[in-house]
Image (cartoon, grey):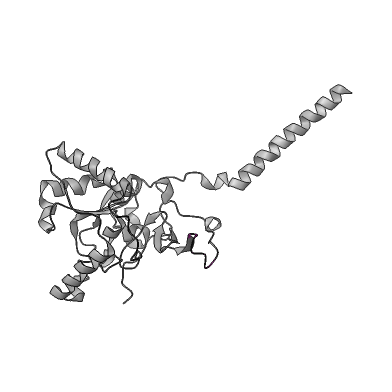
Amino acid sequence: MNKRLIAALGVGILLLNLTGCSWIRTYFRLDDYTAPASTQAPETAPASTQAAVPRTVPPEATRPSSSEIVSAPQGDPDEPRVVGVTANGYQIVEDHGLTYVNGVLIVNKTYSVPAGYSPGDLTPECAEAFARLRTAAAAEGLNIFLLSGYRSYETQTNLYNRYCAQDGRAAADTYSARPGHSEHQTGLAIDVNSLSHTFAETPEGKWLAENAHRFGFIIRYAYAKESVTGYAYEPWHIRYLGEGWAQAVYESGLCLEEFFGITSVYAD
C-alpha cells in the first residue's frame, strides 16, 4: 500500500513539473525572445538602402512581432503607448511627450520633446562615453573637446530666433533646430572643436568619423544626407546612441533616419 502511494505521488509530481514548465514558458513567451541572426535585414527597407544593411545589429534592434505590440490604455498619460511602426518595421513608442524607436529617443524635424523636458546637462551615460572618447583620442595625440553640449528649450529658442533674424527662417531651418526639435535638449548630443566644415579634414575630424561609434556616438548629420536628415552636413555634431546602436548605424552606411525608416520634416 505504501509503495503504491509513493509511486502515485512520484507520477503526480513529475506531471506537475512538466505542465508547470510548459506554463512558465508560455506565459513569459521565451520562444519569442530568441536572439535573431545579427545580419537580418528589415523586410521593408527601401530599395536604395537594401545593399547597405548593417552587419551587426544589437539584440534590441530587432523588429517587434505583431503579438509584442500592446498599446497602453488610450488617454493614460502615465503609461508608454505604441503609436505605430516605422517604414523599416521598428516600433514607435510615445512616453510623456517623448518618442522612442525601439528604445532610442528620436528628436528631429518630425519628432520633438516638450518644452519642459530638461536633463539639465549631458546624461551620465553620454558624458562618460565622451570622456572615454577623449581619452582614446588623446592617446593618439589628438585633442577633441566639448564645444556645446546640453541646451535648454529657452536657449535653443534664443539661438533659433537670432539665426532667423540673421538669415531668414528658411535658411535657418537648414542648420538650426526649432525649439523642442534640437537633439541638444536631450543631453545626448555634443558639438566638438569647431563649427566649420573644415573640421572634417583635420586629424581630429577624421579620427572622430572613423572611431566615434566605438564609444556609442554617430556623426548625426552626415555628408550628402541633407534631404533625409533635414540639416546640412555637420562633421562636428555627434549623437550618443550606445555602442550597439552606434556600431549598427555606422556599419550600415546610413543616417539615423534611413536606418530606422523615419522622416525629418516640419509639419509647417
Residue 114, quarter of the rendered image = bottom left
Q: Is residue 165 left or right of residue 227?
A: left
Q: Which residues are magenta?
A: 74-80
Question: Compared to 256, does 207 lie above or below?
Answer: above
Q: Residue furthest right?
A: 1
Q: Position of residue 255 (x, y in %)?
A: 28, 58
Residue 25, quarter of the rendered image = top right
Q: Nearer the viewer, residue 36 or 122?
A: 122
Q: Does residue 84 appear anywhere in the picture?
A: yes
Q: Position of residue 30 (x, y in %)?
A: 56, 44
**Number of marks:** 0
Q: What residue appears at the point 73 percent right and 36 percent down from the top-left corner?
A: 16
Dominant SS type (magenta): loop
Q: Is residue 237 left or right of residue 256?
A: left
Q: What residue appears at the point 12 percent right and 55 percent down from the top-left corner?
A: 194
Residue 78 covered by magenta stretch: yes
Question: Compared to 40, does 110 lie above or below?
Answer: below
Q: Position of residue 129 (x, y in %)?
A: 27, 44
Q: Quadrant of the N terminus?
A: top right
Q: What residue appears at the point 52 percent right and 64 percent down from the top-left corner?
A: 76
Residue 47 covered by magenta stretch: no
Q: Does residue 174 appear anywhere in the picture?
A: no
Q: Position of residue 181 (x, y in %)?
A: 30, 65
Q: Quadrant of the C terminus?
A: bottom left
